[in-house]
Image: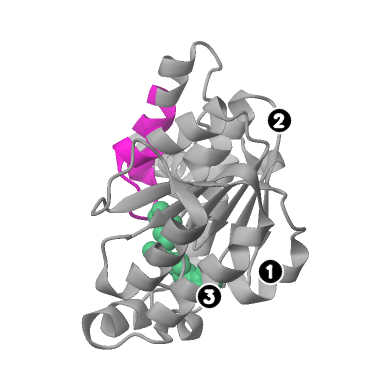
Amino acid sequence: MNLKKWTKQLIGIFLLILSSTPLQANFEKGKWPEYKEQVIQYLPRLEGWCTKEKAERLMNIIVNTSADMYVEIGVFGGSSFLPAIAALDYQNKGYGYAIDPWAVAPCLEGYDGENYAWWSKVNYEKILLGFVSSMKEANLEHRYWVLRMTSKEALSLFETDTIKVLHIDGQHSEVSSLFDVMHWLEKVAPNGRIIFDDANWPMTQKAVDYLLQHCTLDPDSYLGDPYLVFIKK
Ligand SMILES: C[S@@+](CC[C@H](N)C(=O)[O-])C[C@H]1O[C@@H](n2cnc3c(N)ncnc32)[C@H](O)[C@@H]1O
């Protein structure tokens, strides 16, 4: 028997099993700062645009307001969604709703140039699979629902005045961003929070103006920030 060959094959099989078994990320529920740190350490494994600072702010908003319902419009690989759901899980309560069509066509509406070229190349099946696997890996499966549809299609599934924290980060064109704020604001509970992403883009300014007229700007948010937090009156 060629021992060297067998050893090599065994190592190969072992590595294959290791790479196909999802890693478990058990966020230990000790003190809040340490818990957040574990979640933030996990962020680089997720596809998306959430910064460490934003992830921490999102988590703090959820825990400080004792929120039990989080809705995100435009989830992509879950880089904002996972920290938010981890914050719900820390409190042992609530559910999150992940709204995203994970499809090319809705993403291209109203875009041209660089934006159009970038979004038309996204492999959405891979992004969705990565998102769902990460949620499983982080043991957060029991705290969320996937709504694979556009924000317009999801609207009728939610009751008025119910959402405690709404994160709007879907289609950023002027028409879509304005649609999202105008139709989703009534779904947010009084005193609930609205996080509006890419608030410094020219095409989102009408949506920002609408939120400024109908909500209070969170004292820690400043016009010109990349995302803004609003409080529903
Ligand atoms: C900027 S990414 C979201 C990033 C994510 N929130 C994060 O923090 O990493 C925008 C997402 O909006 C989704 N999207 C596009 N059109 C949409 C629509 N009409 N309704 C909901 N989501 C939409 C896209 O599929 C894409 O995943």
**Whole-Å distance between the Cαs marked 3 and 1?**
11 Å
Mark 2 touching mark 3, by CB under 8 A?
Answer: no
Q: Please, is residue 191 above or below residue 211 in the view? A: above
Question: Which mark is in front, 2 or 1?
Answer: 1
Residue 124 visible to an observer of this rendering: no
Question: Nearest the camera: 88 or 172?
Answer: 172
Mark 2 sits near ligand 1, with its Cβ under 8 Å away: no
Q: Which residue is mark 2?
A: 93
Residue 92 visible to an observer of this rendering: yes
Q: Amino acid at mark 2?
A: Lys
Q: Which residue is mark 1?
A: 155
Dominant secondary structure of the residues highlighted in magenta in the image: helix
Disc 2 crowd rating (10 Å Cα; few below 14, some 14-19, many 20+) is some
Q: Which residue is mark 3?
A: 179
- Of mark 3 and mark 1, the one earlier in the sequence is 1
Find numbered disc 3 in the image and state the secondary structure of the residue it sits on.
Answer: helix
Q: Which dot marks residue 222?
A: none
Q: Which residues are magenta?
A: 37-56
